[in-house]
Image (cartoon, rainbow, N blue to C red):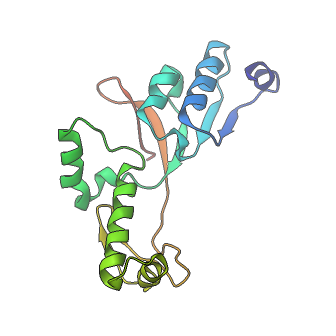
């Protein structure tokens, strides 16, 4: 694959998979002298991507929702995870928020019936979660989504991390 990309003069690789394969592709590309920029989605939102790709990860672009660890309402929860030796990266806080949403729906509807809970959540009223307020429209779609562009680069400690592109 890398040989074919190199022969084609590829400058950008858009990758829709997960961090393991993305990291291997970038590492092999660098080893073979292909300096294409990778653009990927949230499947590479893991510190393991940087470990697998090594220095080849630098400059990789990635789309993902704003880092929930930076939200003011998440600080105490993040501290608890870190105190337990776990970094709540990627979807950890989104999964936590999903449980908070389900709990709010159960409390509001006073029911455990899935359809009744779902109907209660579709009110458009804000539900306070670890990642901020979440609201759903009458179809059940989120009313407050947003995405950000990140770049992978080395931090001051020399570790590869993603940060918001500025």
Report which quarter residue 97 is drawn in. bottom left
Q: Nearer the viewer, residue 112 or 94?
A: 112
Q: Is residue 164 left or right of residue 133?
A: right
Q: Looking at the image, which residue is at 34% across and 23% down? A: 158
Specify the quadrant of the image occupied by residue 144.
bottom left
Please state the total of marks drawn on the protein image.
Answer: 0
Is residue 80 shown left or right of residue 26?
left
Query: From the viewer's perspective, is 22 left or right of 164?
Result: right
Question: Where in the figure is residue 131, as x and y percent of width and height?
Answer: 33, 61
- Residue 126, relative to residue 46: is it above or below? below
Picture layout, residue 158 above or below residue 125? above
Q: Residue at x 29, y 25 (%)?
A: 157
Please identify the residue farthest to the top as the structure is shown.
31
Quadrant position of the N terminus in the picture: top right
Measured as percent of width and height from the top left, residue 133 is found at: 33, 71
In this rendered view, identify the residue nearer to me: 36 or 79. 79
Q: Position of residue 99 (x, y in %)?
A: 35, 63
Residue at image point 34% right, 57% down: 96
Image-based side of 145 in relation to 82, left or right: right
**Residue 86 percent across, percent down from the top left:** 28, 38
């Amino acid at each position: 694959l890398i040989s074919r990309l190199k022969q084609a003069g590829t400058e950008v690789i858009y990758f829709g998979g997960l961090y393991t394969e993305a990291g291997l592709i970038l590492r092999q590309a660098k080893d073979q002298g292909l300096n294409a920029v990778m653009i990927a989605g949230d499947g590479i939102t893991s510190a393991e991507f940087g470990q697998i790709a090594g220095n080849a990860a630098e400059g990789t672009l990635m789309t993902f929702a704003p880092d929930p660890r930076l939200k003011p309402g998440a600080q105490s929860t993040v501290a608890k995870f870190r105190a337990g030796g776990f970094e709540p990266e990627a979807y950890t806080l989104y999964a936590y928020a999903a449980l908070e949403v389900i709990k709010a729906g159960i409390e509001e509807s006073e029911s455990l019936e899935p359809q009744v809970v779902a109907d209660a959540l579709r009110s458009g009223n804000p539900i306070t979660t670890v990642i901020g307020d979440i609201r759903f429209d009458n179809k059940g779609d989120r009313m407050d989504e947003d995405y950000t562009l990140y770049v992978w680069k080395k931090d001051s400690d020399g570790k590869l991390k993603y940060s918001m592109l500025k």
